[in-house]
């Protein structure tokens, strides 16, 4: 296509949309981003970025800024829910960077989002347009138009749907998606570390596994803030929204019988800041594109948060799509090149995240010990997941 002869419209200014905007602007494309929110920002939760994503952050020129606001965990430990017995260890920090050439960062989503937005605006000051809700698109042989709820038509050459799990662009490409409730609901909260005893949990990340539920604990903002996400099986379906609050006493009761460290976190939480949302699975797509529109991130392949790769996949998508648009001779060829090189990998990540649900929730301590004894998760993830570099992987 060339680097200067196409205008790219992006629906959605989340982490994936902003990464795509930055990569495309650096490649010489003209880019406009349309975001439904009235102001830029992200919710108060953590996000993890392994080397397969932080390579792209270095390329964008924001890796040092992200290091400054992140936490670099020494390890992630898989631990039994009641005793805290360590079942497996993932080696991170210096070992992760030495193996893969880029760091493993744990960050507050708001910090990550702000730094990406600042970079995009430094590359093009007026790239991001707020209060712009996408409702669909129109395309012809010569152009595509993003349709907004206020009646505006934004014309360009390529449309990227980065508008999340309720994507209007996905709906038009693939039809309405009916999610299936997994039976899991996720609690989330953040707690200042100064509310705990000194060296609480030794600064280690941990995944606590047990019958019907598990909990993920890691640190943010240089270790000043603790992020807690806990998934529990729940018969009642609830809304798929990250902003629904539930009573603290329900969270406390859900983890009755769990380790004292888990209860220390729950007890230290702000009691009116406990959030819970439904976890759903969506049908997999075998095509993400029309002649001039395509999808990235959750709009293309929503996943359960059981492999810490949702945001990382969106970052990878953005980098590979940028390369495809720069290398292919036509938009259609670029989309096909992009899809060929992303469908298998993202499908595997989505499947393995779902399989982790079963592993983490095994019904007995004996079953958990036996299942983890058969695995070398540090080697498994290093070999295929973290070793991938979307900037240099061969596109075939």
Image: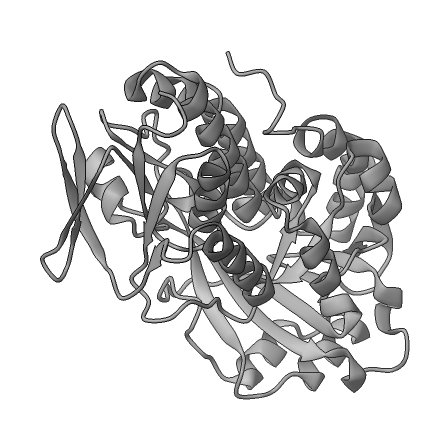
Left or right side of 242 for 109: right
* Residue 150 percent location from the top left of the image: 12, 62
* Residue 148 percent location from the top left of the image: 17, 55
Q: Quadrant of residue 244?
A: bottom left
Q: Which residue is drawn at the image coordinates 44% and 23% (left, top)?
A: 326
Identify the image quadrant of the N terminus. Answer: top left
Q: Nearer the viewer, residue 148 or 212?
A: 148
Figure colour scheme: one colour
Q: How many marks?
A: 0
Q: Which residue is drawn at the image coordinates 32% and 30% (left, top)?
A: 288
Q: Quadrant of residue 94?
A: top right
* Residue 74 percent location from the top left of the image: 86, 53
Q: Which residue is drawn at the image coordinates 46% and 68% (left, top)?
A: 41
Q: Which residue is drawn at the image coordinates 55% and 34% (left, top)?
A: 349
Q: Nearer the viewer, residue 69 or 177?
A: 69
Q: Nearer the viewer, residue 301 or 240?
A: 301
* Residue 158 percent location from the top left of the image: 28, 34
Q: Nearer the viewer, residue 178 or 106?
A: 106
168 to 267, vertically: above or below: above
373 to 250, vertically: above or below: above
Residue 374 in sight here:
no
Residue 170 in sight here:
yes
Left or right side of 396 for 252: right
114 to 333, vertically: above or below: below
């Amino acid at each position: 296509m060339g680097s200067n002869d196409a205008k790219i419209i992006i629906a959605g200014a989340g982490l994936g949309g902003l990464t795509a905007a930055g990569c495309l602007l650096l490649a010489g494309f003209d880019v406009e981003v349309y975001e439904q929110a009235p102001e830029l920002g992200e919710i108060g939760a953590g996000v993890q970025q392994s080397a397969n994503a932080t390579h792209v952050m270095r390329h964008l020129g924001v890796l040092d800024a992200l290091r400054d606001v992140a936490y670099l965990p020494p390890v992630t430990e898989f631990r039994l829910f009641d005793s805290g017995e360590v079942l497996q260890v993932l080696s991170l920090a210096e070992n992760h960077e030495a193996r893969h050439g880029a760091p493993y960062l744990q960050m507050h989503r708001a910090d990550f989002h702000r730094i990406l937005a600042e970079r995009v605006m430094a590359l093009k000051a007026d790239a991001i347009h707020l209060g712009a809700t996408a409702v669909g698109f129109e395309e012809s042989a010569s152009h595509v138009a993003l349709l907004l709820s206020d009646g505006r038509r934004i014309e360009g050459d390529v449309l990227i749907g980065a508008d999340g799990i309720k994507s209007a662009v996905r709906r038009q490409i693939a039809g309405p998606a009916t999610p299936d409730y997994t039976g899991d609901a996720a609690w989330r909260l953040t707690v200042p570390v100064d509310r705990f005893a000194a060296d609480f949990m030794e600064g280690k990340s941990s995944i606590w596994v047990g019958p019907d539920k598990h909990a993920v604990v890691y640190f943010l903002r240089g270790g000043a803030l603790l992020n807690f996400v806990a998934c529990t099986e729940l018969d009642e379906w609830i809304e798929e929204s990250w902003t629904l609050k539930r009573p603290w006493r329900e969270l406390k009761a859900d983890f009755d019988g769990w380790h004292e460290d888990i209860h220390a976190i729950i007890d230290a939480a702000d009691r009116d800041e406990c959030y819970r949302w439904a976890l759903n699975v969506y049908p997999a797509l075998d095509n993400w594109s029309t002649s001039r529109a395509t999808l990235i991130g959750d709009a293309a392949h929503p996943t359960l948060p059981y492999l810490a790769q949702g945001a990382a996949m969106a970052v990878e998508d953005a980098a590979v799509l940028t390369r495809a648009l720069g290398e292919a001779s036509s938009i259609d060829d670029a989309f096909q090149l992009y899809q060929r090189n992303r469908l298998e990998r993202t499908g595997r990540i989505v499947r393995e995240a779902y399989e982790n649900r079963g592993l983490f929730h095994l019904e007995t301590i004996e079953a958990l010990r036996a299942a983890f004894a058969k695995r070398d998760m540090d080697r498994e993830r290093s070999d295929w997941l973290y070793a991938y570099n979307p900037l240099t992987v061969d596109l075939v």
